[in-house]
Image (cartoon, rainbow, N blue to C red):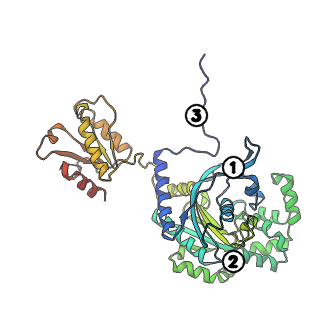
Amino acid sequence: MARDRIKPRNLRGFRDFLPSSAQARQRIVDIFRKAFELYGFAPLETPALETEEVLLSDMGVDANKQIYRFSDLENTKVGLRFDFTVSLARTVAANLNRISLPFKRYQVGPVWRYDKPKRGRYREFTQIDLDIIGVAPFEPEVEMVAAVARGLREIGADNFVFRVNDRRYLGEVLESLGVEPEKAKDVFRVLDKLQKQGEKKVRDELTGKLLLQDFESALEYERMQEVAVSEQAADGLLTATKDASGLAKYLAGFLKRIEQEGVGGDNLVADPSLTRGLDYYTGFVCEVDIRGAEALGSVGGGGRYDDLLGRYSATPLTGVGMSVGLDRLMDALLATEVIAADAGQSTARVFVTVFDDSMRAESASIARMLRQAGVAAEMWLAEGNKTGRTLSRQFKYADKVGIPLAVVAGEDELAKDPPSVQLKDLRTGFGEEGKQSEVPLGELVARVKELLD
């Protein structure tokens, strides 16, 4: 009896990355790693699973309901990390006697959120994260903005814009409007929906006018009824979010320092409507957009979280972090044509053909020589090659997977004194000068490196 075949499909919000995409992602990660390390950030790794107690610390209602949670085989309540910040706080608190302050680290890896999947929003995605623990504002914020900006410029995304705000500024606005300080986090969480849901719906939620069916649970509805603000306060707050002059004055010194680091002009905007949705933010917050791909949402963001570490340690420590979402950044780079969708699938820079099966050892020797010189080389693996007849097939393969150069080692060329090979540049059009040339075997490595520079 034949077995039923399983449909080869992904879970909603989860994706595979074929070599062309995986290589582009890897190049971007490598660029950010180098940028961060130029500023003295060191790598850190933490587990994908955390205890439920740790994960549900100070995320906030909206974030907590997106955490993948379950009981493991030992009946321990655990969950997949929502981001890296909570894990970082736990790690620092557990290792205070082993780390030096300020503690500067970066981390790259997948995180998971049970969110509604759509373009630019996935349930599994990769974050490129960096944090500084143990230093008060604003110099750490300046350094992180500069480091992320450097990475974006290195990948060719010069059309980025940092939007920055400070929750303490918004706190002063709320206080002037007569809103109790204990309501601030809930107000910020609602205000964070302004760009997605529009002013009317945000105003209705702030003033408690939304109906029960507008919320995902009765608990959320009851909570917002309790923290609702007056119509005058809601109008005053929404008016304040449209005028950046007060915020620009509040952050004047900070904005000047960022500009001194080369991030200013069209790349920097003071935005009083920005709050970020996580409850643990206490001061500076920011988001990064790619102009031309704003519909996808921000490609990164972060903020200061001076109270988060207090849940795990009696030692008071300040902290600030930023994160770049690799998946959304990739989508934005594709949308703005900074990178191409049809990038190559091979890591090789030179393709070594097999003229016929009797000369496979000679081709393997050439490939080995290139690799020993640090040049990534791929050799044709299929057997059944007849004298020269499969070369066109081999060239088509090399061109399709994005290998720029190809070597043909024919019997006649190798028999010369000195032996030589034919070197094809697959990036040039047929008939163009330099498309193919005969190169002495002893000069092949130097010629290849010259063409690849």
Q: Residue 25 carries which label?
A: none
Image point (75%, 57%), residue name: 62
Q: Which mark is residue 243?
A: 2
Residue 227: x and y in percent read 86, 66
Alpha-carbon distance for marks 2 and 1? 32 Å
Q: What residue type is labelled 1?
A: Lys
Q: Mark 3 points at which residue?
A: 8
Q: Residue 116 carries which label?
A: 1
* Most foreground residue, 13 or 77: 77
Q: Do the residues labelled 2 and 1 touch (CB within 8 Å)?
A: no
Image point (34%, 32%), residue name: 382
Say which label, 2 or 1, has the lower sequence index. 1
Residue 174: x and y in percent read 79, 76
Alpha-carbon distance for marks 3 and 1? 22 Å
* Element type at mark 2: loop
Say which label, 3 or 2, has the lower sequence index. 3
Q: In which quarter of the image is residue 236?
A: bottom right
Say which label, 3 or 1, has the lower sequence index. 3
Q: Residues within 10 Å of mark 3 (few under 14, many from 20)?
A: few
169 with respect to 107 (left or right)? right
* Element type at mark 3: loop
User: Looking at the rendering, in which quadrant would you find the N terminus?
Assistant: top right
Observer able to see residue 125: yes
Pair 2/1: label in front: 1
Residue at the far top: name it.
1
